[in-house]
Image (cartoon, rainbow, N blue to C red):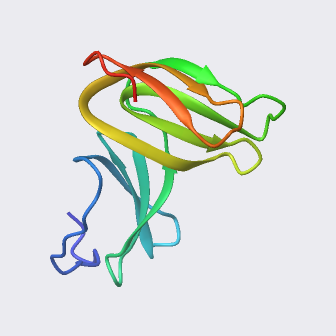
């Protein structure tokens, strides 16, 4: 080992899911952490504050739905959640989590104000 390596005091950071990968960024001021739930965080070394950078589903996507007369957002159905995404921002806007179930289908009401979903527990939400 290199004796000149910078030692970081022991800290903890709360992430969604267990950490599965970690890599120091080239600037040496932060590192990237990936989790088992497909979340990617940037963690500042000086404050140990995690910042969520990217998300995606960690399981299969069973359905995708666009609202009528709009291609700006879409909704996806997967394991334990449904998500609303922005096409232009290329990011998640909303996540509705239902633990220990799988969402198989989603639809958006014609008014655009509600999402209807079908789940593995036999419920329509």
Asked if residue 122 lies left or right of residue 63, the reply is left
Percent position of residue 98, x then y: 30, 36
Q: Is residue 123 above or below residue 39?
A: above
> What is the number of callouts on the image?
0
- Looking at this view, is 31 or 111 the one in front? 111
* Residue at the bottom extreme, as displayed: 46
Q: Is residue 33 above or below residue 6?
A: above
Residue at x 34% of width, y 83% of height: 47
Percent position of residue 34, x then y: 37, 47
Residue 96 falls in which quadrant of the image?
A: top left
Asked if residue 93 lies left or right of residue 42, the reply is right
Percent position of residue 2, x then y: 25, 68
Residue at x 43% of width, y 51% of height: 40
Asked if residue 85 lies left or right of residue 100, the reply is right
Q: Is residue 27 above or below residue 113?
A: below
Q: Is residue 115 above or below residue 49?
A: above
- Looking at this view, is 95 or 111 the one in front? 111
* Residue at the front extreme, as displayed: 111
Residue 121 falls in which quadrant of the image?
A: top left
Residue at x 71% of width, y 30% of height: 110
- Looking at this view, is 92 or 115 the one in front? 115
Residue 32 falls in which quadrant of the image?
A: bottom left
* Residue at the left extreme, as displayed: 10
Percent position of residue 1, x then y: 20, 63
- Looking at this view, is 12 or 122 the one in front? 122
* Quadrant location, the C terminus: top left
């Amino acid at each position: 080992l290199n004796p000149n390596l910078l030692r970081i005091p022991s800290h903890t950071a709360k992430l969604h899911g267990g950490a599965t990968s970690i890599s120091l960024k080239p600037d040496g001021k932060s590192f990237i952490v990936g989790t088992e739930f497909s979340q990617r965080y940037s963690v500042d070394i000086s404050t140990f504050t995690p910042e969520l950078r990217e998300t995606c589903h960690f399981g299969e996507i069973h359905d995708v739905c666009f609202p009528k007369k709009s291609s700006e957002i879409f909704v996806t159905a997967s394991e334990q959640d449904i998500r609303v995404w922005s096409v232009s921002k290329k990011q998640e806007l909303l996540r509705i989590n239902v633990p220990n179930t799988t969402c198989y289908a989603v639809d958006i009401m014609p008014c655009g104000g509600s999402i209807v979903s079908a789940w593995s527990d036999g419920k329509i939400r």
